[in-house]
Amino acid sequence: MKANKYLILIIFSSGSFLSCNKDFLEKKQQQSLVIPASLSDFQSLLDNRDAMTNNSCHELGIIGADEYSVSDAVWNVLSAPYQKYGYIWAKDVYEGAQLDEWNMAYWRILHANTALDGVKQIKPAEVERQLWNNVKGSGLFFRAYNFYQLAQQFCKPYSATASTDPGLPLRLEADIDLLSRRSTVAETYSQIIEDLLTAAPLLPDLPLVKFRPSKASAYALLAKVYLLMANYEKANEYAGLSLAIKSDLIDFKTLSLSARYPFPSDYELNKEVILAVGISNIAITGTARMNVVPDILNNYTTGDLRRQAYFFNNADGRVLFKGSYKGSAAFYTGLATDEVFLIRAESYARMGDKENALKDLNTLRKARFTVAAYQDLAASDANEALRMVIEERRRELIFRGIRWEDLRRLNAESAFSRVIRRTVAGTTYELLPGDNKYVWPLPDNEVTLSKIEQNPR
């Protein structure tokens, strides 16, 4: 491995994020950088939670989605341009500022590529084969997972025009001197799938710790990818493979629903967590600022324990979110079995299998209701079952960054499309189905430096 090809060499003593800019170069002169060389080095690199799993690329999606509102007073004092102007889907979202969400995702991809480039140079002894497999599989998974997240923010939804729509710069090596270019959306999704299909056989069924990838998480992510591609047979297949490994659900009747944080802060104690990923607090959605929108709250019927587990009524009349699987005020954005059940239920319904769609849907719902209030849902046909699943996704998966993905893909269907409206200082802003603003602009500095195509706004 050539040291000069790895400007982003890993600082094992620090979990801080360094963007590839002037700040990085300054810190590079101040800190001791270590070149990873052994399998254990590369595993440690991928186990760096501060770098790899503590902050996912979901902030803009959460900011732009229809799950909350803020007052004019809150909006006026927001200091981060991407939050203030992302809230109203403005044409200029960043005002020239760096976007950590983009930088950090590519930093994680750089970690993954460093490990992948490294294991190519190592011929493992038999006793090291399992570790070698885990490093390679984890590197491929994390690269795919970050490409997936970036695509939901900065690329058009997968559609009939995917072969020509601009995709991501696909960084597949740790050599940062290589010039960036945008692939197509089809190429982006193809790379994600290729990485995951290669990773899955290398990974254990379940991880040693939940911030590590596994077969269950690779299959769950493949199910998500294929759902967005409207390949429902494949979505169903991989959701089933994931659930065959891990299908645990939390019985909400066992939770302390009056607690400020009903879910455990230790991911290892959360039965539903497949891959433990979260996001830091976003100022605009902090508990001192946000208000959950009423149309979500009205969707929870009597006896649905999620109303108490997910929300609490603040003294000032606002309804706040408390239900994160992080066991804190920060948002959980990782993979979990409840989402996989809903993916399989939707794919069954899309394929016309009403009975199995309802079976998965009711399996989830039974774990969410009081005994007295619970009744199995029934549907007259697969279309009605599909509507029930889509409604359940909004109730179940709130504030996980998934709603933005759903809005983007469902807007192509008249039965599920919707207009989002927000009013600030007397001006109403609208986000229409299919609007270009469902694709966030690339960071200004990336376009300037790499001379890649900007997204239309």
Image (tube, rainbow, N blue to C red):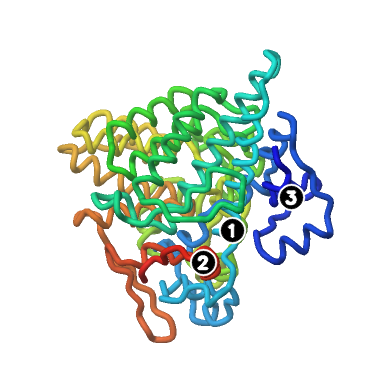
Q: Which residue matches tag 2?
A: 443
Measured in 3D between alpha carbons, the distance from the residue under mark 3 to the one under mark 2, in whole angstroms, is 24 Å
Q: Crowdedness of circle 2 by 10 Å Cα count: few (<14), some, many (20+)?
A: many
Q: Which residue matches tag 3?
A: 15
At a point 56% along the width and 45% down the height, the residue shown is 325
Q: Earlier in the sequence, mark 1 or mark 2?
A: 1
Callout 1 touching callout 2 (CB < 8 Å):
yes
Amino acid, disc 3: Gly
| Residue depth check, mark 1 versus mark 3: number of the one nearer the observer | 1
How far across and down, in percent of the image, does residue 341 sit?
Answer: 39, 35
Residue 211: which numbered mark, if any? none
The answer to whether residue 273 of the structure is visible from this angle is: no
Q: Is residue 339 left or right of residue 110?
A: left
Residue at the limit of the structure toward the left, as seen here? 380
**Quadrant where the C terminus is found in the figure:** bottom left
Amino acid, disc 2: Pro
Assign a secondary structure to mark 1: helix
Measured in 3D between alpha carbons, the distance from the residue under mark 1 to the one under mark 3, in whole angstroms, is 15 Å
Q: In this rendering, is residue 60 above or below 367?
A: below
Measured in 3D between alpha carbons, the distance from the residue under mark 1 to the one under mark 2, in whole angstroms, is 9 Å
Amino acid, disc 1: Asn
Q: In this rendering, is residue 144 above or below 16?
A: above
Q: Which residue matches tag 1?
A: 103
Q: In this rendering, is residue 439 above or below 142?
A: below
* Tag count: 3
Q: Is residue 295 left or right of residue 38?
A: left
